[in-house]
Every structure is written in C-alpha cells, then in structure tokens.
Amino acid sequence: MKLQKEYLLRYTPVGVIALLLLTLPLYADLSIVSLITKILIFGLLVMSLDLLVGYTGLMAFGHAAFFGIAGYTVAILGKHYNVTSFWLAAPAGIFMAVFVACIFGLVALRVSGVYFLLITLAMGQLIYGIVHTSVGPLGALTGGSDGLGGVQYPEMFGYAFEAETFYYFSFAACLICCFLLYWITKSPFGYGLQGIRENETRARALGYNTWLYQYIAFVIGGLFAGIAGVLYIYYNGFISPEGVGIGASGFLWLMLIIGGSGTLWGSIIGAAVILVLQYFVGGLTPERWPLILGVCFVGVIMFYRGGILPQLINLWRRVINGRSA
Amino acid sequence: MVLFLVASGLSLTLGLMGIVNLAHGVIFILGGFVGLAIAKLTGSFLLAVLAGAAASGVAGLIIERGFLRLLYKQDLPQVLVTFGFIYIITNLMLWICGPTPRSAFVPSYFSGSVVIAGVSFPFHRFTIIGIGVAICAVLWWLQEKTKIGAIIRAGMDNAEMVGGLGINLTPINVGAFFFGSALAGASCIIGAQLFGSVGFGDGMDMLLVAIAVVIVGGVGSVEGSLVGALLIGIIDTFGRVYFPVISQYTMYLVLILVLMFRPSGLLGRKL
C-alpha cells in the first residue's frame, strides 16, 4: 500500500503536465498553443536524435536532413503533383526520410567517432545543397532558397484540422512515438545499443553485430525524424533550406544537451526551454538571438552537461522523500 | 591553393589534438575582416596579412585556452563548443561591422595580368599560387624535418606515449592551434583577391570545403591536404563549368566516394 502511494507520488508531476497539456486550448491563446505544438514536434525530433546520440553513441550532425526531406516530400507532392491527401503524402514523406537514412547509414557507418560526425555533417549539407539549388528543374521543384510553402492543415475523414485540433493531433502522434521510442530503448535491442555506446569492442566480442545495430538505430532515427518532419510541414505550412542545414542540426544538439542526452523525455524539456527562449528573445532582440544561442551553447556544454531532466527528477525525489521523512 | 592553406590549419588541429574546430570558418572570415580593415587604413598588403593572421590566431588561442583545454579528450563537447562559437563570433562581427561584405584588397604591385598562350591571367593569381607553394614548403619542412615536426607527428600517433617520454605537449598543442587559426586568417586575405569579397556566408562555405579537403586528403599530413585541396578545387571548378546544376554538391559526392573506399583519406594516417 505504501509502495503504491509512493508510486503515485512519484508520477504526480507527469500527471499534472499531461492534464495541463490536454486542457491547453481551453485557457491558452492561439500563439501559445502553436508554440506548444512546435515544442512537441521538435521534442519528437530531438528524441529521435537522442536514440542515436544518447543511446547508441553515434554523433550524428546532419539529423535535420531527414526532418527536411520528409517535409519537402510532403510540400512537393502537394504543390507539384496535387497530392494533398494526408494518407498518401505523409507516408511518402516518412518513406523518403527512411530511404535516405538507409543510404546515408551505409556510407556514414564506415567511419566512427569524430569522422562519423563530419561525414553526417557533409551529408546534411549535401541535402541542403540540393534543396538550396535555385536553377534548373531541381530549383523549380524545391523553390530553391525561397523554400516551399502552401501546405494546409491535413484533412482526415472529411474533417479539416485547425490550429487547435492539429495541436491534439500532434500531441497524440508525439505521445505514440514517445512510447514507441521508449519501448525500443527498453527492448533487448535498446540495451544492445547502450552496450555498444559504452564499449563497442566488448559488444562485438560478445557476439553482437554492432554494425547492424548501429545501422538499424540510424534508420529508426531517420524514421522518427521523418515523422516529425511531416508533422512540422503540416504545422508550419512552409519549409526552407534553413530548416535542413547545419544550423538546424546544431539547434537540435543544443536542445538535446540542455534536456539531457540519453534520457529520452529530456529531449522534450530541452526543446521547450530553447523554443520558449527563442519565442521571448525573438520578440525582444531578434538580431542578437544567434549570439544568445551561441552563449547558451558554450555555457551549457561547459557547465551543465548533465541536462535538466535528471536534475528535475532528483529534485522531485528530494521533495517526496522530505515529505515522507 | 587557398583551399590548401585553410585546410592545412584544420588538418593540423584535427590530426594533432583530435579536435574538429567547426569555428575554423568564422576564424577565417574574422581574419579577413580585420586584415582588410588594416589594408584600408595602411594600404600595405603585408601588414594586412599579418594583422589578419594575428586576429585569427588570437581568436583561436582564446577558444583553445579558455574552453577546449577544459574539455580535454572529450570529442563531442569540444565540437559543440566550437559550433557555439560560430554563432557567437558571427553575431558579434555582424554587430560591430554590419552585414556588408568587405571587398578585397589587391595591392598595386599585384595587379595587371600576364598573357600565356593567348589567354590573359590576372597577376595576383600567380602570387596566390606562389604564396601557397611557399607556405606548403615551409609546413612540409616544419612537419617532416624539424624536431617540433617530429613531436607533432609523434603526438598524432600516440599523445600519451609522447607525454610519457617527458615531452610537454601543451605548448605544442597551443602553438598548433594558434598557427592553424592564423593560417586561416592569412589565407582569407590572400584568397580574397580571388573571390573579390569576403562576406559572412563564406565562413560556413569555407569550413565545409576545408572539412572535405581534410577528409579526402587524409588527416594530419601536409601532402594529404595538398592533394585533397587540388582534387576538391579542380572537381569543384570543372563541376561549375560542365555540370552547373549539380555543382553545389559535386564536392560532397567526391567526399562520400572517398570515404566509402578509403575511409582514412587518400594519403591519410590510419584512423
């Protein structure tokens, strides 16, 4: 009985946050709802990066590319081929992200460590180069540096989503993906990945096909980044090369580290911190935002690498224990 | 040749210290901006190159001593710190200097052109090539023929062993970082004659090209950087002429191909 009570107490914050999020459109105005939607989508994206970085130890620096590929696929299908059905465009976007992840993984996993970081960075920039090209048939397809817009909220079963209902849709999608990712990390496969992160040589000696494990993790990361990309293009209605390149990938890294890498849920907190900061600073001094971002980057890495989530958990544990003592 | 100059600095820090300095590109334009300002003031090309190199070198020194030193042996945080500095330095420069690109400074004694086989080449191209070859020779001599070079090469192979032999690697590391950054700054001013101007976008472009050069050529060797720079430079130029549509990413295709078949680069040390 005591155990149950403790359990309940421990997860109270989760319940409170869930309740707040579920009832959000009732009390918050539209810009806040929109901000939270964005946080959820980026949270999902950062989580997919966390699977690679925090769990497998792969330093992928081109993760925004998969996100962008999915978004661009949906936008191109809608604009040039008149495919506006969610049931066609969304799977196509996710498929393209996974497809590219399959190819990139083959190349990138030939090297490890810092070189893996560099090659994923280069591949991310390759995608950036492709969507940034303004000339030729490609330019017409992707809109070059102007980006591609005009994507509406999706329509399902004859019902067209609006900002608030799309918030619930994203919330549900992110929740499902969260649990899938959580399940993956707690599966034998997930523990295998963590073993590789800790000591690849030992994992190999134990008979693990470490290459295959890393490859599958890379593709799964691409898959969830693709899902986030599809959600984002429907949310934002517009995508430009800036959302694909090295800047975007670095942005994700910052969220990941602030939230705490290897914690999965921390990713959402990291995304929330950065996006809320961007929301307010963007309103005050948009010109100095990159400077603040850079200082955050350096500061967090120098002094605060554990991330917020582990500290929050510790704090709550102390609160509970203090009360029961 | 400009590619070689930029890349050899990056290669030095990557090979010796295992640090990927993503801020190398902004350090490059920092040197360019400072140097070109000095050039405008004094009208001296030599002073401009020295000032640019000094500014870049000091920036590199601050990053190394102030931050990277505290993250010794931790690859990922080091990379991320240098990434953060891209934002910081770029935005500070934007704040101070404004967004306009700086136009290049071509000293009068480099202007004019030479006619070879009926085609006229601007004279400053030859000076760029000349300076590049000279620096390449000096670097090669430093790394292969001197005691410092021997320590550097040994440090690339096994830093702990070098330390165990009673050699203090810290000054070598600091010097390498300073020197690599200074090279980047100097090459920006030298290369600006070719590009015509230096803007904020160039930093990122140059960083990516330098990374490609280092990976293709192989980390930690002067010859590797040279071969990589020539290969990437030629492919990029021909790509622009013959396949303009894919010219923005021919470089990456080469990079990926090399990594697939020779993961340690064409002339690199073993990873």
Image (cartoon, helix red, strand yellow):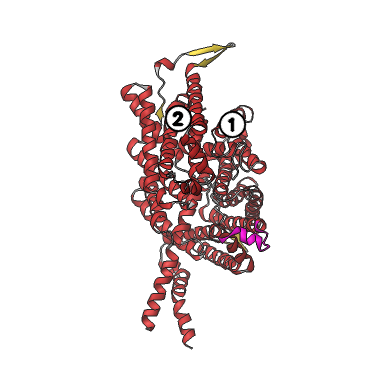
Residue A35 shows in the view: no
Residue at the extreme left of the image, as rendered: B41
Residue matched to label 1: B227
Which one is nearer the viewer's eye here, A71 or B151? B151
- Based on the picture, tell me whether residue A299 belongs to the magenta stretch: no
| Mark identifier at residue B123 | none
Judging depth in this view, the residue of A243 and B238 nearest the camera is B238
Callout 1: SS: helix
Of the residues shown, which amino acid type is indicated by label 2? Ser
Q: Which of marks 1 and 2 precedes in the sequence?
A: 2
Quadrant of residue A192 within the rendered picture: bottom right
For this orientation, the residue located farthest to the front is: B165
* Above or below, B41 relative to B183: above
Number of callouts: 2
For the question of whether residue B149 can be seen, the reply is: yes
Lateral position of residue B144 relative to residue B255, left or right = left
Q: Do discs 2 and 1 share a chain?
A: yes
Give residue A71's position: percent from left, percent from top: 57, 51
Magenta: main secondary structure: helix
- Residues packed near mark 2 inside 10 Å, few (<14), some (14 to 19) or many (20 plus): many
| Residue at the spot of label 2 | B187
- Mark 2 or mark 1, whichever is nearer to me: 1
For disc 1, the neighbor class at 10 Å (few under 14, some 14 to 19, many from 20) is some
Residue type at mark 1 is: Val
Identified at 45% across, 61% down, the residue is: A259
What is the magenta range?
A198-210
- Comparing B243 with B269, the one in front is B269
Q: Secondary structure at mark 2?
A: helix
Work out whether A20 lies above or below A282: below
Chain letter for mark 2: B
Q: Is residue A117 above or below residue A323?
A: above
